Amino acid sequence: MNSDETVVRSTCPACGTVDVPPEAVTVLVAGEGSDPVYRYTCPQCYAVVEKPTSARAVPMLQNAGAQVVLVPAEVAERAGRQGEVLADTDLSAFLAALGSSDDLARLAAGL
Ligand SMILES: [Zn+2]
């Protein structure tokens, strides 16, 4: 056992208790009034599992190596209503656009 290795202990609906490496966890923070959720791919059955968490746990998960993504409340609400989850590719495109004002300007111009 390597006690230095941090894992996120979670419960997969299919597998029961699983240990997930923090780097494989994405925390979605929707802002005031709604609880953050964390999402990971189950290391045993490869299902995508999403669990609510508390705002207090977010910095701990982040320190452990989890990726934290801020989701505008209206997006989270829309996704919840349609029973859909933001696709990872959409999210990374979104984040890439945020990281570059040139890209953002181009997006705004519809190019
Ligand atoms: Zn599983």
Image: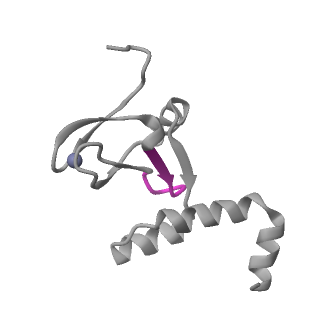
User: Which part of the image, by quadrant, shows the N terminus?
Assistant: top left
- In depth, the one of 62 and 6 nearer the eye is 6
Residue 54, x across and y down, in percent: 41, 42
User: Which part of the image, by quadrant, shows the C terminus?
Assistant: bottom right
Range of residues picked out in magenta: 25-35
Reply yes or no: does residue 86 show up in magenta: no
Q: Is residue 34 above or below residue 73?
A: above
**Residue at horizontal 72%, vertical 62%?**
98
Residue 33, x across and y down, in percent: 48, 57
Q: Is residue 110 above or below residue 72?
A: below
Indicate left or right for 10 with 106 as reference.
Answer: left
Residue 31, x across and y down, in percent: 54, 56
Residue 69, x across and y down, in percent: 56, 52
- Kindly indicate the quadrant of the structure image that contains residue 17: top left
Q: Is residue 70 above or below residue 85?
A: above
**Residue at horizontal 18%, vertical 50%?**
13
